[in-house]
Amino acid sequence: MSLAHQNIEALVASCKQKDQKAEFEIYNRYSKAMYNVAYRIVKDEHYAEDVMQEGFLRAFMKIHDYKQEVAFGAWLKRIVINHSIDFYKKQKNLQFRDFEEVLYKIEDAAGSEFEVDFQNVRVEQVLHAIQNLKDNYRMVITLFFIEGYDQEEITEILNISYANCRTTISRAKESLRKALTEMN
């Protein structure tokens, strides 16, 4: 059976045996999705390509650590996300403030003064608005809404407190709401 017709478990088993053709097949299957993940975080197509490729290298070097507790794609995605965030922090010296030390907290307002007609908002507009958010807002919005991580996972990935994560998500949602309102 050719590699193109093998299931992912068989390809992973071949990768554990250092089969470069199996690695190439996995790369071909997942590279576009992993590039998109990296691009949403690092915001540069050339860096995203590098980060994505390094993510694959890390994955193939740690393939023996993959225990099939989660889908292979999810495991690979976590590696690419972590590497993307590490890269981004090194490039931008991104520092999160600990909002627990701030004297005030912003809670999600039950009724926001900004109402957006989401029926007329296009995906491109939303992605553009997200790309134009402050870096820490863009990162948490991407991880929360696009990548589907919950707040506990985001706190681990970004190494921030739960309160900081919650506050940052709240502020990011409000900034996004404002940006979308201005577009309409």
Image (cartoon, rainbow, N blue to C red):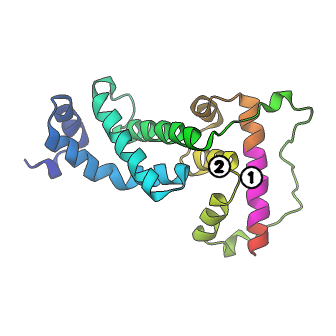
Foreground residue among 67 and 110: 67
Foreground residue among 165 and 93: 93
Name the element at disc 2: helix
Query: Image check: 84 left or right of 13?
Result: right
Where does label 2 land, which residue? 141
Name the residue: 77% across, 45% down: 170
Badge 2, how many Cα within 10 Å: few under 14, some, many 20+? Answer: many
Quadrant position of residue 43: bottom right
Name the residue: 56% across, 43% down: 91
Name the residue: 78% across, 39% down: 167
Query: Image check: 13 left or right of 114?
Result: left
Amino acid on which disc 2 is placed: Ile
Mark 1 or mark 2: name the one nearer the start of the chain.
Answer: 2
Quadrant position of residue 184: bottom right
Q: Main secondary structure of the magenta part?
A: helix
- Residue stretch in magenta: 169-179
